[in-house]
Image (cartoon, rainbow, N blue to C red):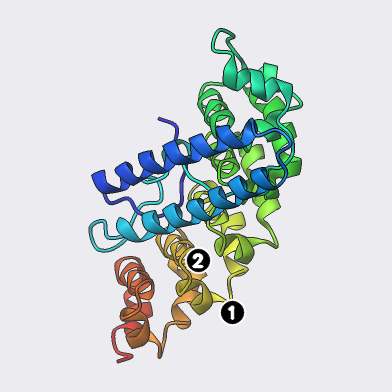
Amino acid sequence: VVWGGGGGGGGGGGGRHNHNKEQRQAGGQRHGGGHAGGGGGGMYQMMNQRHHQGHHYHNQGHHQGHHNQGGHHSHHDAHMMGGGGGGHDRAKPMSALLEEFKSNKNRRFDLTDLIDHIVEFSADQHGSRFIQQKLEVAAEQESELVFSEVLPSAHELMMDVFGNYVIQKFLEHGTPAQRSALAAQLTGHVLALSMQMYGCRVIQKALEVIDKSQQSDLVAELDGHVLRCVKDQNGNHVIQKCIERVPPARIQFIVAAFYGNVLSLATHPYGCRVIQRVLEHCTNDQKSAGIMVSY
């Protein structure tokens, strides 16, 4: 199964239904946008409509399936194969290769056929899905050819509605060197990515797979911004993932930010989930120092 981490709502069948509906609408709008030609205002209007619909479906998915056994949802469930809307400006004309890929059902493509067009394909719904599928079984040399094109545009793809899934696929199936290189690309951008609807998924995936030293360095960038993230619809998922995946001793600054704020966070729609993660994963000393007794 080709999937992408992050995003809202893994509430079982309902979340998957919204995903399928979302994917069909995003696919239809993208296809229409690709063949609109030089319609000027018409293309802008279509892209603007697609962007707002993408936000609508993202938020709908974010809030519909959050409570998955104890209130925490999985970002993996609702956004399989990069379904969704939004993304960055795609006014750039579609290449002849991508157009053929989407229209010629008789030609069988391989990853090597996409060389010099990997970034464009990664930011396309169907192209992204194709790359994800191929990366799961690609030989190391073939994977490295793709990665060499992805890395210079990694930051852009991390924040893209479809490109973020290609980045996650490299984090999951890539070599240790590829994971390390992507983690380096995150450095200095953790807060901004955590607050962005697609970037937050990449941060969560990175926290699951990178080595402990890089993990700690990335998490440290959130010091001083914990409460801001907790109250953000995207950032709260990153804080939850930090609590779940990072050794408790390395996230004391996160727990300390909650001392004196537990009551307000426990009644906040996002904060309540974060407090649950603390109770589930932090040490007794961390909880007794301020979580359980602060109100």
Real-space CA distance between mark 2 and mark 1, rounded to the nearest whole angstrom: 13 Å
Would you place residue 225 above or below residue 172 in this image? Answer: below
Residue 98 position, x and y percent, is 66, 24
Depth order, front residue of 19/9: 19
Residue 260 position, x and y percent, is 40, 91
Q: Earlier in the sequence, mark 2 or mark 1?
A: 1
Residue 108 position, x and y percent, is 58, 10
Determine whether, in the image, residue 114 is placed left or right of residue 196: right
Q: Secondary structure at mark 1?
A: loop
Determine whether, in the image, residue 170 is placed left or right of residue 282: right
Residue indicated by mark 2: 235
Q: Secondary structure at mark 2?
A: helix
Residue indicated by mark 1: 224
Q: Is residue 139 visible?
A: no
Q: Amino acid at mark 2?
A: Gly
Depth order, front residue of 7/144: 7
The quarter of the picture where residue 35 lies is top right
Q: Residue at x 68, y 43 (%)?
A: 90
Mark 1: few, some, or many residues within 10 Å (few <14, many ≥20)?
few
